[in-house]
Image: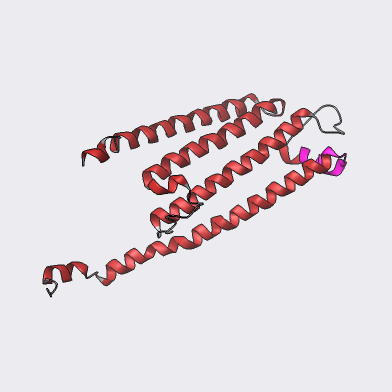
């Protein structure tokens, strides 16, 4: 039976300061728990808006006014019933909540797996496909793509309700959306340059 060499024994030793620095990653845990709480708030907000939409569809004027206030819809004529524009704005708002919720899930699961600790989900039937190859670069690209989707929904809501916005607001929102697109393309291009598709096979 061979004894471990002194070199291997020293290699396995970790300096207490190194242990402390490495353990500091657990300080991120309250942040991810906070994001889970924010996810719960979004779920509650989604159901409140959905219930208002259902009630307004059956003629509840108070629910209709709550929807009009929440989406910032204005009209010269008195609105006493749902119309296509209000329904579309409310549905886009619900889609917006879902996309932000998806973004939160990516940050919570991907961030925890990348920066805190392994989730050990190998073989789990519900394991997300993207979690198999998640790292900081992949997470950045996915987050940038999700933000573009959210920005697109916001921009569409603004254009549908364009009468209630100043031209400068429309121009700035469009410019910001284009900036998001350019940033996402730059992140994806940088990741491709740093990690070419054939690099893994070359090693």
Q: Is residue 89 left or right of residue 184?
A: right
Which image quarter holds the C terminus? Answer: top left
Q: Residue at x 58, y 41 (%)?
A: 99
Q: Nearer the viewer, residue 80 or 120?
A: 120
Question: Is residue 136 visible to us here?
Answer: yes
Q: Residue at x 40, y 48 (%)?
A: 132
Magenta segment: does it hold 65?
Answer: yes
**Which percent across, then down, holds residue 94?**
67, 40
Q: How many marks?
A: 0
Q: Which residues are magenta?
A: 57-68
User: Compared to 90, does 16 lie above or below?
Assistant: below
**Which percent across, then down, holds residue 78?**
86, 31
User: Compared to 36, does 155 lie above or below?
Assistant: above
Q: Nearer the viewer, residue 101 or 72?
A: 101
Q: Nearer the viewer, residue 168 or 130?
A: 130
Asked which colour scheme the image uses, the reply is secondary structure
Q: Residue at x 45, y 45 (%)?
A: 129
Magenta-colored segment: predominant secondary structure: helix
**Which percent across, then down, holds residue 191?**
34, 37
Q: In which quadrant of the rendered view does residue 187 lie?
A: top left
**Which percent across, then down, holds residue 3?**
13, 74
Q: Residue at x 50, y 28 (%)?
A: 178
Q: In which quadrant of the rendered view does residue 73 lie?
A: top right
Question: Is residue 134 visible to us here?
Answer: no
Q: In which quadrant of the rendered view does residue 186 lie?
A: top left
Magenta segment: does it hold 54?
Answer: no
Which image quarter holds the N terminus? Answer: bottom left
């Amino acid at each position: 039976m061979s004894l471990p060499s002194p070199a291997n024994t020293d290699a396995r030793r970790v300096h207490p300061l190194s242990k402390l620095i490495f353990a500091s990653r657990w300080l991120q845990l309250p942040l991810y728990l906070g994001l889970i709480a924010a996810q719960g708030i979004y779920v509650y907000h989604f159901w409140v808006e959905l219930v208002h939409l259902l009630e307004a569809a059956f003629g509840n004027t108070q629910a209709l006014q709550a929807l009009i206030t929440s989406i910032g819809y204005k009209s010269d004529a008195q609105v006493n019933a749902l119309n296509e524009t209000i329904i579309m704005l409310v549905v886009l708002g619900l889609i917006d909540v879902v996309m932000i919720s998806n973004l939160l899930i990516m940050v919570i699961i991907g961030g925890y797996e990348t920066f805190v600790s392994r989730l050990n989900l190998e073989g789990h039937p519900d394991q997300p496909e993207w979690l198999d190859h998640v790292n900081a670069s992949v997470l950045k690209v996915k987050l940038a793509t999700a933000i573009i989707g959210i920005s697109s929904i916001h921009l569409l809501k603004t254009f549908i309700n364009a009468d209630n916005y100043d031209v400068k607001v429309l121009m700035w929102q469009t410019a910001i959306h284009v900036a998001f697109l350019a940033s996402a393309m730059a992140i994806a291009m940088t990741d491709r340059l740093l990690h070419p598709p054939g690099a893994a096979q070359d090693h």
